[in-house]
Image (spheres, rainbow, N blue to C red):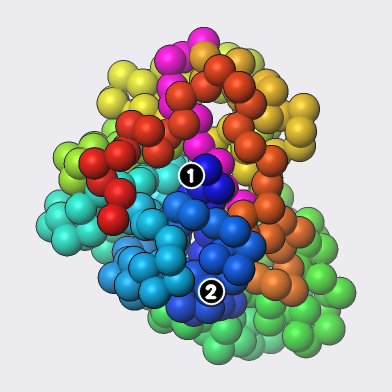
């Protein structure tokens, strides 16, 4: 089964529409697809329709920003009811702080001589409620401050750098509950990206499970092949189902295209098996 259960459209920080993503996924052989915009489900109905128009099956998706022990962690939700009110309110609240955060980022960048970054980032944001660091990165590349978005993150947008603003996202408990109460499955996104110590990672997995979380991304565009194996072991150790997703954002920026990752390592429960009744 070629399942790709993690990617972004213009509804968050991707550059393609849900329709263009669906076409690209299908052309790359994806059979089961989920669009997982950051803190947003505004693209879900379009994505499901486009999946069906391109002969794919569909799972609803989102990627919720969470603050856990002072660090940002992403929790993917799959197969939930996209019209669930509590979930809708939770996501609205989570993205609510993004406007002020973006203005503050812009003020800080101003101090290092980068002007007009808020207005610049907004021009790249397809959804004004969802201004993200990615949109700032695209603006800084456009204006020639950096050559590519990765460099912008390294020099300006990560902890300790001039444009980084500490932000408080949803709690792990709330994010997992919003998803599970809406009949979905919660999945820890790209765990290797957090650079947690062994103790911190153990705490994340343990608390996530205690709140009702059931899955972890094992094969993702954010992991190396060695990390697939590390998190396959973690999935087994914690009794979590395994997910697979490219985290595709843009043909110009993403190194992993939709549907092109290797299959899950053997001996894992694929998350889509737990979600068979939620597939559209
Ligand atoms: P935000 O939710 O506004 O903090 O933005 C987070 C997004 O920034 C992630 O979902 C990625 O798309 C992007 N991102 C984070 N780190 C990097 C990086 N080092 N290079 C490129 N994009 C990144
Ligand atoms: Mn992103
Ligand atoms: Mn993420
Ligand atoms: Mn993502």
Q: Position of residue 65 (x, y in %)?
A: 44, 50
Contact between labelled residues 2 and 1, with CB atoms less than 8 Å apart: no
Earlier residue among tags 1 and 2: 2
Q: Quadrant of the C terminus?
A: bottom left
Q: Is residue 97 at all visible to an observer of this figure?
A: no
Question: What is the secondary structure assignment of the residue under circle 2?
Answer: helix
Q: Tell which residue pokes out farthest to the front in this image.
A: 55
Instruction: Judge left or right: residue 249 versus residue 255.
Output: left
Disc 1 residue: CB within 8 Å of ligand 3: yes
User: Dot 2: within a 10 Å radius of its alpha carbon, few (fewer than 14), some, or many (20 or more) residues?
Assistant: some
Q: Tell which residue pokes out farthest to the left in this image.
A: 85
The correct choice, above or below, for 28 with respect to 31 in the image is below
Q: Is residue 239 magenta?
A: yes
Location of residue 263 (image quadrant) = top right
Q: Nearer the viewer, residue 114 or 2?
A: 2
Q: Nearer the viewer, residue 228 or 103?
A: 228
Q: Is residue 75 magenta?
A: no
Q: Position of residue 73 (x, y in %)?
A: 50, 41
Instruction: Judge left or right: residue 130 versus residue 248.
Output: left
Q: Position of residue 66 (x, y in %)?
A: 42, 44
Residue at image x 63%, y 62%?
Answer: 28
Residue bearing the label numbered 2: 23
Residue bearing the label numbered 1: 74
Q: Report the span colored magenta.
A: 237-246
The correct choice, above or below, for 223 with respect to 50 in the image is above
Numbered disc total: 2
């Amino acid at each position: 089964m070629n399942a790709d259960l993690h990617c972004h459209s213009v509804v968050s920080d991707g550059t393609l529409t849900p329709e263009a993503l669906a076409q690209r996924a299908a052309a790359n052989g994806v059979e089961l697809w989920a669009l997982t915009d950051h803190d947003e489900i505004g693209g879900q109905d379009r994505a499901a329709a486009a999946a069906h128009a391109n002969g794919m099956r569909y799972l609803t998706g989102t990627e919720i920003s969470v603050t856990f022990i002072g660090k940002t962690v992403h929790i993917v939700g799959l197969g939930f009811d996209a019209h669930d009110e509590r979930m809708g309110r939770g996501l609205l609240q989570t993205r609510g702080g993004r406007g002020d955060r973006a203005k503050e980022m812009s003020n800080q960048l101003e101090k290092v001589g980068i002007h007009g970054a808020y207005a610049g980032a907004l021009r790249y944001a397809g959804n004004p409620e969802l201004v993200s660091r990615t949109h700032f990165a695209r603006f800084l590349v456009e204006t020639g401050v950096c050559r590519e978005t990765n460099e912008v993150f390294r020099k300006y947008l990560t902890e300790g750098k001039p444009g980084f603003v500490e932000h408080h996202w949803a709690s792990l408990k709330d994010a997992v509950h919003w998803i599970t109460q809406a009949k979905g499955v919660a999945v820890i996104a790209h765990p290797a990206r957090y650079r947690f110590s062994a103790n911190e990672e153990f705490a994340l997995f343990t608390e996530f499970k205690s709140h009702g979380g059931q899955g972890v991304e094992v094969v993702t565009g954010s992991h190396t092949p060695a990390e697939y194996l590390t998190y396959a072991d973690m999935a087994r150790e914690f009794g979590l189902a395994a997910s697979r997703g490219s985290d595709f954002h843009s043909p110009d920026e993403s190194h992993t295209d939709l549907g092109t990752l290797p299959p899950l390592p053997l001996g894992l429960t694929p998350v889509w098996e737990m979600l068979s009744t939620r597939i559209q």
